[in-house]
Structure formats: structure tokens, C-alpha cells
């Protein structure tokens, strides 16, 4: 689409800054940056302890020096550091698991300074849910962006500022988390990666016997009996007395013998039916696959002929007095549905103000449950959000006025400005902004009708991933800091435009901040009147 764009001319105390209990750290990079400072504080405290008992704590000293260097790098650019999903996962893992192991190791001879600091800080640490959430995010990124395990493990991701890698133990941990979710596909991938890194000579506490035990079972669950047998044989070479492996081996041999018998009676007709079914599977593109392709920049459906109809222009808000002498830059992003982008529409200073107002109140983003009509968290929306009113800040009030001027719609019936920050692998899977016919009470409590339109500010650039995609029409809109996109969710008739179904792609590398305004039907009767045709 670029061809049609023609613009030529600090130190932290013992307590965290926010006094909140655990609140899904992994769902917001903005909140995870506080953990960087927390971890740095713990390192400082730990180094003080080492000075007191250095002769007894050589092993702990090595750990502290490694963490000291890491946190020094991280605190210089917390958001950039956590923008690398591997760094985010490892932060969850360190604070949830490894610091606890360290505490147990040194508790016996520990000085009061370190243990008291650790005790206070632990109540604010990530928990198992955070570590699992961060791990699932890595698996989600792997699938969405077609990343092989070696690429992800080596940290070879586009646009990274702080390269990081996964150890064999980290890979083993990812495989175990996938296993507990009965996700045998990813269990196999990450157990194989752990095994590969050990075979290459990596020194690790990960045990090949344990890895092969998980791996062989995961492979068996996916129906590859011969490979499961081969892996079990390798396990028995390392541990001939392994009880479960010996039992599995006998079972695999029994099943293999039965399958050979059954295969003799299979016919060519069955093989042909299988091939036809496989062809149909390949020919059919479900929404999930279209969504992931668009996230990668593939599958766009804008033809050159349609693209030529997209323009950029100076826009005065239909001769709005505030913009006649200083019109704004506007670009067409898509034709049907019509999506327009406004450039340089929010300043860096305004962005920072909005972020600072939102940060203390960020909480796990929710969705409307169509069955209950209530707000609830969902696995398909991984972010944190906050709501800002116009009366609490002149900046927010000014932003609201700007939206009204440029859309021509009344913002007095709109929802408050929603600010969202996406966590590691943060996403919002395909959804509608408007309420469908089967959700008549979705916005009943507001009393302002359905969501007629969406205005979306991009408040950060994203190094990789994070696009807003429309699977129904094959459109991808990429984040550009300081810009905003706008589209109508309803036709003039009031019927929902189903082509506006959209999604926020997972953030592969970087930190994504957005804010949006949902405008409602009430108050727009004379601003966007119905047409004479019911079909429009």
C-alpha cells in the first residue's frame, strides 16, 4: 500500500511503586517493567549479603553477577528489553522459580537484610499462572509467525534490541508446560530442542532421561509409534532399569504387531478417500489460519486496481473551523470497509500523559460474555487496559474533542477512552466491536445504543508483529506511533457491518500501546442520518 501514499514535502525502595496484589503480570509489558526494577533491587540486596559471607557463598556470587549484568541492561530500557518475548518469559521463570530455589539454598546462613527484603518482595512476584502465561505466549508466537524452535531458542527475532537465548532447561520447561496442557505437538517440539542443545554439548541441569520420557509419550500421543519406540530405546540405553520405559516398550511392541495385522486388510479405496479428505482440508482456510497469515503480512486481498483508488489527502474535518487553516494528513488504508488513517494526530507528549494516567490503573482486559452479558477475562484477549475520562485531564478532554471534530460524530455518548498495553505475545483474537442480533443487551446499561464506529490510536511503534487485521476482507493495518485509524462498525441503516471483524495480532518483538474510543448510536441521528434505502 506504500505506492499510494504521497507525502513528499532511578533507584527503587524495597516496595513496589503500586500496592496491588498479583494481577496477571504477563498480560502487560507496562506492568512487567516494574518487575525489572524489583529484580534489580533484589540483586543489590543479594550482593550486600555476598560481601558479608563471600567465603561460603561462591555459587550464589556467580548467580548474582550474572543477574547484575542482565538487570543493568534491562533497567536502561525496560520496555525494549521486555519487548523480546524470550526475555519476558525468562523474567517470569526467574522470579517465579529460580529466585525461590536460591532462597532455599541460602536461607540457613542468610543475613537479615536479604531475607527481609526477599520476604517483602515475594508478595509482589509473578506466580505459576504468570510463568505459564508467558510460556503459552511463546508457543502462540511460534505458531502465528511460523518460527521454528531453534530460531526462537537462539533469540533470532526481527528488530530485537536485547538478544537473548533459551537454555536446554528453559526448553524443557516450555515442553513441560505444553505437556500439562495436553499440547503434545509443542511438547515434542520443545523436548526435541532441549535434547538437541544437550547433544550439542550444552552444560545443563536438565536430564536427558526425563526429556526422553516426556518426548516419547508426546510422540506416541500423536500417533507416531515407530518414533516413540526409537526414543524409548534411547531412554533405556541411558537407564536400562527405567520401569515406565520398559513397560511402554512392551506395550508399543504389542500395538505395532496389531497395526501390522490391520494394515494388511486396508484397501486402495480407503487410501483414495483419505487423499480426498486431505485435499479438502488444505483447500479450506478457517478464520484462524487467515488471521495468522495476515499477521505475517501474507494473504492480503487488495488488488492493484483497488489499490489505485486509495488516496492520501489533507482533511479539514468537513470544514471544521479548527482544521481549515491546519488540516490533518489522512490516508486510505482500505476501501470496503472503509478504513482511514490519520497521521501525526497525537503528540509524543500527549501519549506519555495518557500512559502515565493509565499505568496505575491497568487491569486485565475483559470481554462481553454473550451468554451472561457480563464482563469476563478470556484467553483470546491478552492485555491490560484502563479507562480515562475527559474530566480528569485536559489532555484526555482535548483528545476527545479532536475525535469529535474529525469524525463529525458526537462523543458525549461515547465510551471513555480505553488505553491498552499488550504483554508478552499480547493479542486480541478476531472479534466484532458492535453487538450482534443475538446480543441485544450488550450495551443496555449504557443506554446509548450500539457501537457505531471505532477510533484507534497507535501510541507506540512495534518492532515486529502487532498488526490490526481484518480476516473477512484480508486487510492488515500496521502500528505507527502518533497515528490513528477509524472505521464504521454499522451501516447507515443500523445493521452491523460483518466485514469489520478484526483482531490484534500477537506482539512478536516490542511493546504495543494503543488507546481507542468507541462511539455509540445515540446523538448521531443528524450527524449520520439513515439513507432512503434499507440496504445501505
Image (cartoon, rainbow, N blue to C red):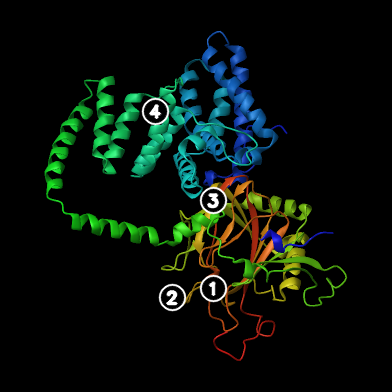
Which quadrant of the view contains residue 342?
A: bottom right
Q: Residue 247's spot in the image, x, y percent?
A: 18, 30
Q: Which residue is mark 2?
A: 438
Q: Is residue 313 left or right of residue 210?
A: right
Q: Residues within 10 Å of mark 1 (few under 14, many from 20)?
A: few
User: Could you tell me residue 21's position as x and y percent?
Assistant: 54, 44
Quarter holding the N terminus is: bottom right
Tell me the SS state at disc 2.
Answer: loop
CB-based contact (under 8 Å), mark 4 and mark 3: no
At x 28%, y 25%, the residue is 234
State the residue position of label 4: 195
Q: CA distance from mark 2 to mark 1?
A: 17 Å
Image side of residue 58 versus residue 387, left or right: left
Judging depth in this view, the residue of 230 and 28 nearest the camera is 230
Mark identifier at residue 445? 1
Name the element at disc 3. Answer: loop
Q: Nearer the viewer, residue 146 or 374?
A: 146
Amino acid at each position: 500500500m506504500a505506492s499510494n501514499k504521497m507525502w513528499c514535502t532511578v533507584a527503587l525502595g524495597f516496595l513496589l511503586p503500586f500496592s496491588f496484589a498479583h494481577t496477571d503480570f504477563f498480560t502487560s509489558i507496562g506492568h512487567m517493567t516494574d518487575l525489572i526494577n524489583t529484580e534489580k533491587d533484589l540483586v543489590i540486596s543479594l550482593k550486600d549479603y555476598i560481601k558479608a559471607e563471600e567465603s561460603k557463598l561462591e555459587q550464589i556470587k556467580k548467580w548474582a553477577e550474572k543477574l547484575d549484568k542482565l538487570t543493568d541492561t534491562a533497567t536502561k530500557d525496560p520496555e525494549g528489553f521486555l519487548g523480546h518475548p524470550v526475555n519476558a518469559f525468562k523474567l517470569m521463570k526467574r522470579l517465579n522459580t529460580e529466585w525461590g530455589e536460591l532462597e532455599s539454598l541460602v536461607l540457613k546462613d542468610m543475613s537479615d537484610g536479604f531475607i527481609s527484603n526477599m520476604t517483602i518482595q515475594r508478595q509482589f512476584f509473578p506466580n505459576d499462572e504468570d510463568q505459564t502465561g508467558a510460556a503459552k505466549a511463546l508457543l502462540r508466537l511460534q505458531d502465528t509467525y511460523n518460527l521454528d524452535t531453534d530460531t526462537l531458542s537462539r533469540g533470532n527475532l526481527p528488530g530485537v534490541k536485547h538478544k537473548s537465548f533459551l537454555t536446554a532447561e528453559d526448553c524443557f520447561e516450555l515442553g513441560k508446560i505444553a505437556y500439562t496442557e495436553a499440547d503434545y505437538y509443542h511438547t515434542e517440539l520443545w523436548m526435541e530442542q532441549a535434547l538437541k542443545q544437550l547433544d550439542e554439548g550444552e552444560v545443563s541441569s536438565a536430564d536427558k532421561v526425563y526429556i526422553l520420557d516426556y518426548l516419547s509419550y508426546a510422540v506416541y500421543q500423536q500417533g507416531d509409534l515407530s518414533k516413540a519406540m526409537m526414543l524409548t530405546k534411547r531412554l533405556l540405553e541411558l537407564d536400562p532399569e527405567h520401569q515406565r520405559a520398559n513397560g511402554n516398550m512392551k506395550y508399543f511392541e504389542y500395538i505395532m504387531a496389531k497395526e501390522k495385522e490391520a494394515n494388511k486388510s486396508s484397501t486402495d479405496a480407503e487410501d483414495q478417500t483419505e487423499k480426498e479428505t486431505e485435499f479438502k482440508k488444505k483447500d479450506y482456510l478457517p478464520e484462524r489460519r487467515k488471521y495468522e497469515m495476515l499477521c505475517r503480512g501474507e494473504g492480503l486481498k487488495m488488488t492493484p486496481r483497488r489499490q489505485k483508488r486509495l488516496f492520501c489527502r489533507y482533511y479539514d474535518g468537513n470544514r471544521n473551523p479548527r482544521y481549515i487553516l491546519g488540516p490533518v494528513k489522512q490516508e486510505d488504508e482500505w476501501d470496503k470497509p472503509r478504513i482511514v488513517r490519520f497521521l501525526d494526530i497525537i503528540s509524543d507528549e500527549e501519549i506519555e500523559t495518557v500512559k502515565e494516567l493509565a499505568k496505575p490503573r491497568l487491569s486485565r482486559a475483559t470481554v462481553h460474555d454473550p451468554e451472561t452479558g457480563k464482563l469476563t477475562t478470556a484467553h483470546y484477549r491478552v492485555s491490560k487496559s484502563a479507562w480515562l475520562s475527559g474530566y480528569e485531564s485536559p489532555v484526555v478532554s482535548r483528545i476527545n474533542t479532536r475525535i469529535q471534530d474529525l469524525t463529525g460524530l458526537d462523543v458525549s455518548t461515547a465510551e471513555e477512552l480505553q488505553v491498552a498495553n499488550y504483554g508478552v505475545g499480547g493479542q486480541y483474537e478476531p472479534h466484532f466491536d458492535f453487538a450482534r442480533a443475538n446480543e441485544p443487551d450488550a450495551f443496555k446499561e449504557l443506554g446509548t445504543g450500539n457501537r457505531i464506529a471505532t477510533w484507534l490510536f497507535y501510541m507506540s511503534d512495534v518492532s515486529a508483529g502487532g498488526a490490526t487485521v481484518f480476516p473477512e476482507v484480508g486487510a492488515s493495518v500496521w502500528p505507527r506511533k502518533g497515528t490513528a485509524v477509524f472505521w464504521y462498525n454499522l451501516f447507515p441503516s443500523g445493521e452491523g457491518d460483518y466485514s469489520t471483524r478484526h483482531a490484534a495480532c500477537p506482539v512478536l518483538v516490542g511493546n504495543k500501546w494503543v488507546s481507542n474510543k468507541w462511539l455509540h448510536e445515540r446523538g448521531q441521528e443528524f450527524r449520520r442520518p439513515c439513507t432512503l434505502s434499507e440496504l445501505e
